[in-house]
Each structure stands twice: as structure tokens, then as C-alpha cells.
Image (cartoon, helix red, strand yellow):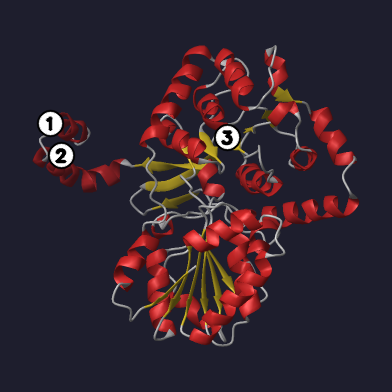
């Protein structure tokens, strides 16, 4: 794990590497993904069957084989351990309550001259949610993506997820049931994104696609954007921590590892003004690594993509973290809320020593689908508005167009748009 000081001669170059952490050469992957998309566009289910047999190790025989039935979902839910069932319901309720507060409103304003202006908010008709599968299963990703769509009022939600050897994960099935048993198809990877974007004999075309995935999924989302909307193009998970001398090294260490265990490409970055904390955190990391089931992944991530930066003061730490713009940001200082006004770029901000990042992954309520790789500078977390669209409302009275028509016509004439000009002047005769 790199340990850097802002006073080091080579700090600027080392820090630039951290800023470039989200840049991945997708040129080779892009060609593969484009071929997969084109196959699905041309052949529909036939291509999906072929891809499933190749990548997921089972062979669908008919269109109906792709869909997971509601009965399967209910059976998994009924068989679920009661404590786990309670935890899923707790997460569902908190996520729904939080996202209900995000709902935008339609509005109309009436001006004295008879002008009516407003905004009409409408949910998309159909949303597609991609849930990763294969090596790991993430029911939490399902909840975080489906619940905002439900709150937005989306009429039809389509879920796709890879199912290795045609054996759906029971916990995922139970989570689907809690979410109202949306139509769910056993299709993964770039093939699923293509099917959601363009439709097949089984999977209907959607208006927006959300959900995390590997580089093939992310690349597919990038390529279909414009034909459908997407939430974002997310990369490997990451955490940034700002800590001072009051932070507990064991808390800092395990929180850094909570992201490192996700993926060898995950980034874990501590910025502190206290060198003693940096040293003790490194010691705690080595201790915790021995206890992790995903030790190999976490070790590679923390050693190759982890960093500790020692600054002259907390203000410098904040400035550097704003440049990094992390997906998750923990503030472990004496008075964390005092720092909050100065944080400009972060996907989610966790304040205080009793708010570890995993709380946000599961039960806090805010969405855990967050911008990565520095894109928190211009992207927001997944939210209800991703599943909604806005229409402007405009109505002018005779009095209003008499008052403003000539100015409008003049601007149109200045731009050389004669028909625009005449369209307004015709009403002033």
C-alpha cells in the first residue's frame, strides 16, 4: 500500500495516478461487446440462447426458459430464514422511505397577463434493471435499483441477471418477491443490456437501463446510450477516508478493506494529517487481512490500488479528496459535520465513527449505486428522477403574445429563421 506525503518530490505524479484510477482501455472489449449487441439486435432470443450456453453453462430450449416465475420467487421467500427476511424488509422500507422524499413535483405558474408556465413530471413507461450474478450475488443491488423505479411510478420493471448453470440464487429470488415480483429474465452480461435496449422475443425494449456490472456490462451501457437512457457508467468500487488524530486505526483499516474485498481493481484511499494514524492503520490492515474470506482479492487491491496520503493539515486533506471525488467518503474526525460544507465532490458522505460505509450499502436508505472514478464531480447517485422525465408547459394568452411577440420575432429574424419570425408575427396581425 503506497504511503505518500504531500511534501514528497514525486507526490504530484503519484497523486495523478490516483486521479487516473478510473481510466480503463476498453478498445478490445468494445469490439467484442459491439458484436454481441449486433447479434442480439439481429437474432433476438436465438443470440441470447447461444450466449447463455457459452457464458452461463446451460442451454435454454424455448423462450419461456428465460423467465423466472413468480412461484419460484415466492417459494424462495417462504423458505428464507426469518432474521434474513426481516433484514431485507428493513432495507426495503428504509430505501423506499428515503427515495419517496426525492420525488419531483409537477407545477404550474400563472402570470398576470395570462401566460401559463409549468413543468409536468412523468415516469418512464418501462425500466430495465441489471443485477450482477455469477461469482457473487447482490440482492442489495436489486433493492437499490428497483425501489426507486417503483417510487417513481414506472409501470413495468424488467430485471435481468446471469444465472450460472440455471440455478438462481435463493436470496435474490426472495428479494425479487419483496419487490413485487417484477418480470425477471436469466440473461447476463452485454447480451442482457442489448436485449433491454432493443428488445427480443421474450424481453421487451425499455426506456432506461440501470444497475452495476463488469466491464462488458459497463461498455454495453455506453454503446446503447442514446437509444435508451442509462444511470451511469460505473467502474470498480472505491472509498476515500479523511481522518485526524481522533480516528480509531482499526475502524479506518477495516473500512478501507470493506471496499478492497469487492474487486482487485477497487481503490481504498486514506488522507490524514496524522502520521501516527497512518502507521497504526497499516498495522491493523495486516491483522484484518488474515481474517477475511476474500483475503486474496483484498490483498491485491489494497497493495496495488490502495494509498495513504499524509498532509500538513485537514484543509489540505479536504482539497485533495475533492480532487479524487470518491464514490464513498468517510469523515472520521473530531467534528465531522464541520467539514461537510467544504466537501464538494463525493458520491455518498458518511459522517462519524459509527457510520461505516457498509451501512450505506444495505440499510441506511440512500442509494448505493454511486459515481466512481472521479465522476462524482458531475454525476449524482442513482435516484428517482433517473426513472422520470420532465415536460415543459407553455401557454400564452393574446395579451401575452401582444406584449412579447415583437421581441420574439426580432430574435428569430436575427438568427435568420424567417418562418419562426412569421409564425409569431402572423398572430400579431
Determine the secondary structure under disc 2.
helix
In the picture, measured across the screen, residue 358 lies left or right of residue 88, that is left
Pair 3/2: label in front: 3
Task: Report the disc number at residue 412.
Answer: 2
- For mark 1, what is the residue? 418
Task: Report the disc number at residue 127.
Answer: 3
Q: Residue at x 57, y 55 (%)?
A: 102
How far across and down, in percent of the image, does residue 90 sit? 78, 56
In the picture, measured across the screen, residue 429 lies left or right of residue 242, that is left
How far across and down, in percent of the image, does residue 22 sit? 41, 53
Q: CA distance from mark 2 to mark 1?
A: 7 Å
Q: Residue at x 70, y 60 (%)?
A: 292
Q: Residue at x 64, y 69 (%)?
A: 254
How far across and down, in percent of the image, does residue 273 sit? 46, 84
**N-term-proximal mark, 3 vs 2:** 3
**N-term-proximal mark, 2 vs 1:** 2
Pair 3/1: label in front: 3
Determine the secondary structure under disc 3.
strand
In the picture, measured across the screen, residue 88 lies left or right of residue 376, that is right
Q: CA distance from mark 3 to mark 2?
A: 39 Å
Amino acid at each position: 500500500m503506497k504511503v505518500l506525503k504531500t511534501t514528497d518530490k514525486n507526490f504530484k505524479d503519484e497523486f495523478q495516478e490516483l486521479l487516473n484510477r478510473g481510466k480503463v482501455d476498453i478498445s478490445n472489449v468494445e469490439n467484442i461487446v459491439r458484436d454481441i449487441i449486433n447479434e442480439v439486435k439481429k437474432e433476438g432470443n436465438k443470440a441470447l440462447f447461444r450466449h447463455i450456453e457459452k457464458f452461463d453453462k446451460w442451454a435454454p430450449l424455448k423462450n419461456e426458459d428465460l423467465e423466472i416465475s413468480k412461484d419460484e420467487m415466492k417459494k424462495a421467500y417462504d423458505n428464507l430464514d426469518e432474521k434474513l427476511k426481516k433484514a431485507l424488509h428493513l432495507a426495503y422500507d428504509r430505501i423506499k422511505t428515503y427515495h419517496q422524499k426525492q420525488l419531483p413535483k409537477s407545477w404550474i405558474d400563472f402570470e398576470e397577463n395570462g401566460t401559463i408556465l409549468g413543468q409536468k413530471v412523468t415516469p418512464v413507461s418501462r425500466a430495465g434493471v441489471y443485477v450482477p450474478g455469477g461469482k457473487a450475488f447482490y440482492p442489495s443491488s436489486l433493492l437499490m435499483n428497483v425501489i426507486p423505479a417503483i417510487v417513481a411510478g414506472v409501470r413495468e420493471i424488467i430485471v435481468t441477471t446471469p444465472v450460472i448453470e440455471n440455478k438462481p440464487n435463493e436470496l435474490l429470488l426472495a428479494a425479487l418477491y419483496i419487490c413485487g415480483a417484477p418480470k425477471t429474465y436469466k440473461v447476463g452480461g452485454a447480451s442482457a443490456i442489448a436485449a433491454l435496449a432493443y428488445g427480443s422475443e421474450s424481453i421487451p425494449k425499455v426506456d432506461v437501463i440501470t444497475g452495476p456490472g463488469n466491464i462488458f456490462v459497463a461498455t454495453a451501457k455506453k454503446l446503447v446510450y442514446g437509444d435508451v437512457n442509462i444511470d451511469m457508467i460505473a467502474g470498480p468500487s472505491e472509498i476515500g477516508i479523511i481522518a485526524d488524530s481522533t480516528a480509531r486505526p482499526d475502524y479506518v483499516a477495516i473500512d478501507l478493506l470493506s471496499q478492497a474485498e469487492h474487486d482487485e481493481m477497487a481503490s481504498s484511499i486514506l488522507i490524514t494529517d496524522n502520521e501516527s494514524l497512518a502507521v497504526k492503520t497499516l498495522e491493523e490492515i495486516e491483522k484484518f487481512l488474515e481474517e477475511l474470506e476474500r483475503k486474496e482479492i483484498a490483498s491485491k487491491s489494497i497493495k496495488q490500488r490502495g494509498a495513504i496520503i499524509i498532509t500538513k493539515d485537514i484543509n489540505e486533506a479536504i482539497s485533495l479528496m475533492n480532487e479524487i471525488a470518491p464514490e464513498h467518503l468517510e469523515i472520521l474526525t473530531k467534528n465531522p459535520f464541520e467539514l461537510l460544507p467544504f466537501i464538494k465532490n463525493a458520491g455518498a458522505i458518511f459522517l462519524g465513527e459509527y457510520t461505516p460505509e457498509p451501512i450505506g450499502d444495505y440499510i441506511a436508505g440512500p442509494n448505493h449505486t454511486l459515481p466512481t472514478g472521479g465522476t462524482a464531480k458531475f454525476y449524482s447517485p442513482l435516484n428517482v428522477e433517473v426513472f422520470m422525465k420532465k415536460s415543459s408547459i407553455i401557454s400564452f394568452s393574446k395579451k401575452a403574445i401582444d406584449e412579447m411577440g415583437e421581441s420574439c420575432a426580432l430574435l428569430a429574424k436575427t438568427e435568420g429563421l424567417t418562418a419562426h419570425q412569421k409564425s409569431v408575427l402572423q398572430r400579431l396581425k
